[in-house]
Image (cartoon, rainbow, N blue to C red):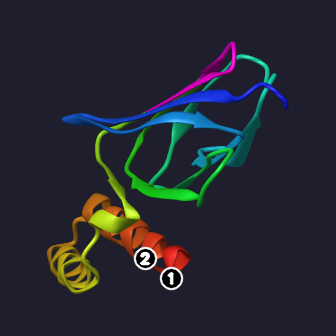
Amino acid sequence: MADLLQIELVAADRVVWSGQASQVIARTVEGDLGVLSGHAPLLSLLVPGVVEIKPPDGEVVRAAVAEGFLSVADNHVSILSEDAFLASEVDASATRAELEAAQSEGDQDAVMRAEAKLRLIDKAS
């Protein structure tokens, strides 16, 4: 079996997910980035979007993330985000209400976060 990645997905207030995976896909300022075992060291800026983590034995773990950083070194991936939620933690109706409120207030950061959560719900279903 190929080496696995050690993944840490951390929000400002908690560890959202930690464990081993065969692959991680995240959205950065340069586009979508896939990380496999043996990836070259990397530091990149995250944009609001969906992170997909593929554990070796199990379902894909999906999380919505806000702005942050992605670091890769020695098969260890750290995803550090101001805000992050697993798909199971997102309430669709509450998120739609957040989106409407953010749009009416003109809060583009909140709009991007709510849209990322809704994309997460769509991908998880």
- Count of labels shown? 2
Question: Residue 10's spot in the image, x, y percent?
Answer: 35, 34
Front-lying residue, 49 or 124 = 124
Residue at left offset 78%, top offset 28%: 37
Q: Quadrant of residue 6?
A: top right
Instruction: Report the residue marked by disc 2.
Output: 121
Structural crowding at the residue carrying mark 2, measured as other residues with C-alpha within 10 Å and reported as few (<14), some (14–19) or many (≥20): many
Vertical arrangement, residue 89 with respect to residue 25, above or below? below
What's drawn in magenta, residue-wise? Answer: 72-79
SS for callout 1 = loop
Image position of 43 (left or right of 116): right
Question: Residue 7's spot in the image, x, y percent?
Answer: 54, 31
- Circles 1 and 2, Cβ within 8 Å, touching? The answer is yes
Front-lying residue, 31 or 79 = 79
- Mark 1 residue type: Ser
Q: Tell me how far mark 1 sits from mark 2, CA to CA.
A: 6 Å
Q: Quadrant of residue 91?
A: bottom left
Which mark is on residue 125? 1
Vertical arrangement, residue 79 with respect to residue 39, above or below? below
Residue at left offset 33%, top offset 62%: 113
Question: Residue 49's spot in the image, x, y percent?
Answer: 49, 58
- Mark 2 residue type: Ile
